[in-house]
Image (cartoon, coloured by chain):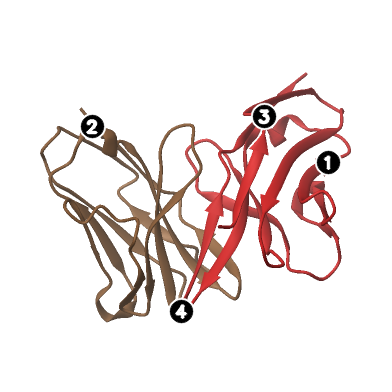
Chain colours: A red, B brown
Amino acid sequence: AQSVTQLGSHVSVSEGALVLLRCNYSSSVPPYLFWYVQYPNQGLQLLLKYTSAATLVKGINGFEAEFKKSETSFHLTKPSAHMSDAAEYFCAVSVTGTGFQKLVFGTGTRLLVSP
Amino acid sequence: EAGVAQSPRYKIIEKRQSVAFWCNPISGHATLYWYQQILGQGPKLLIQFQNNGVVDDSQLPKDRFSAERLKGVDSTLKIQPAKLEDSAVYLCASRGGREQYFGPGTRLTVT
């Protein structure tokens, strides 16, 4: 079964520091992978997606992720954290079957940004 | 373009009561999802609709949860009777292409 694992339920960084949020996937077929961000009391917003084109994917708000098949990873990075980046981040894999397509999410990583 | 709308945003009920949530997807999106997000966890799919037909409800606790999507647009999710463990955020999403767009969610607290 396709799944994703997010390492680290909480990540703390200082403002201006590198952000690295880890996601590893398990899939027997080429996966479609997504990163979503969730701000307090809001729904999920798509940051970026990998759909088997370029392995380095650029998203909104300065985030990017690199698909590494050899490491089964799709880690999310941002060179310089802002206070406004503090939120919950979810990695997800798209699972497709006969007539259906759904997202399977990781458990999430809460990013804390300190001044 | 208007996003996915959900109401109410918050609901507090006692156990064994019933509750209903409403979702209006993005115009033109045929596929609609309901997810349950328990505190500290990622969203978990409850049910997927394609137009007004159910595609996948394998994770829906059918003894207490029901959902419908009449006319293939709006959808309602109902819980009857509610249990303490149903306390969660209920997210509605609709799909355009391969992307899912999420509403703000309904936070349910069962006391």
Q: Residue at x 70, y 34 (%)?
A: A84
Are labels 4 and 3 assigned to the same chain? yes
Between circles 1 and 4, the one closer to the viewer is 4
Q: Amino acid at mark 1?
A: Lys
Q: x%, y% of residue A55?
A: 86, 61
Find residue A8 and name its label: 3
Q: Residue at x 46, y 55 (%)?
A: B103
Q: Height in image: A108 above or below A59? A: above
Find residue B1 and name its label: none
Between circles 2 and 4, the one closer to the viewer is 4
Q: CA distance from mark 1 to mark 3?
A: 17 Å
Q: x%, y% of residue A18?
A: 86, 32
Q: Amino acid at mark 2?
A: Leu
**Can you identify the residue that label 2 sits on?**
B84
Q: CA distance from mark 2 to mark 4?
A: 33 Å
**Can you identify the residue that label 1 sits on?**
A78
Q: Residues within 10 Å of mark 1 (few under 14, many from 20)?
A: some
| B31 horizontally vs A16: left or right | left
Q: Earlier in the sequence, mark 4 or mark 3?
A: 3
Question: In what element is the residue under mark 2?
Answer: helix
